[in-house]
Image (spheres, rainbow, N blue to C red):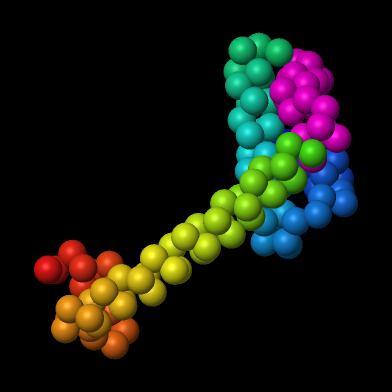
């Protein structure tokens, strides 16, 4: 059996992600390559041909690195936007509840209080 984990780690060396995220990406891609490889073997390909097909399935590794980082940047932008909209929204809801005499109980999310009304 091939060591897809090590292969992917080598091909994605220098990927600028947090260690936990990098580990997750590598594990997911390694599992995908192994699945493709096993499927090619089941279809009767030689091990060498199955490896070539699995690696071809990953495509250009530099391009893959760029795509992974682009997705990460988009996630960060969305998280920032969510915080900008979501957190002020909770503050606004707290203010409305306070003025209506229904200030939320300590430790209970505002959304829960609004839904109970």
Q: Is residue 70 above or below residue 19?
A: above
Q: What is the quadrant of the N terminus in the image?
A: top right
Residue visible at 12% across and 68% down?
117
Q: Nearer the viewer, residue 52 or 83?
A: 83
Residue 116: % across, % down? 14, 68
Q: From this viewpoint, is residue 45 visible?
A: yes
Q: Is residue 6 above or below residue 97?
A: above
Secondary structure mainly formed by the magenta segment: helix
**In the rendered structure, which segment of residues is drawn in magenta?**
46-65
Q: From this viewpoint, is residue 2 visible?
A: no
Residue 51: % across, % down? 77, 24
Q: Nearer the viewer, residue 94 or 61?
A: 94
Residue visible at 18% across and 64% down?
115
Residue visible at 82% across and 44% down?
12
Q: Furthest-left residue in view?
A: 117
Q: Nearer the viewer, residue 108 or 32?
A: 108
Q: Is residue 13 above or below residue 84?
A: above
Residue 56 within the magenta-colored segment of the rendering: yes
């Amino acid at each position: 059996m091939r060591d897809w984990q090590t292969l992917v780690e080598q091909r994605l060396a220098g990927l600028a992600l947090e260690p936990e995220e990098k580990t997750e990406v590598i594990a997911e891609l390694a599992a995908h390559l192994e699945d493709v490889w096993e499927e090619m073997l089941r279809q009767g390909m030689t091990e060498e041909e199955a490896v070539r097909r699995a690696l071809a399935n990953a495509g250009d590794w530099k391009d893959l690195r760029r795509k992974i980082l682009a997705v990460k940047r988009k996630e960060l932008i969305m998280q920032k936007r969510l915080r900008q909209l979501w957190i002020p929204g909770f503050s606004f809801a707290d203010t409305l509840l306070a003025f209506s005499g229904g200030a939320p109980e300590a430790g209970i999310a505002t959304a829960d209080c609004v839904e109970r009304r």
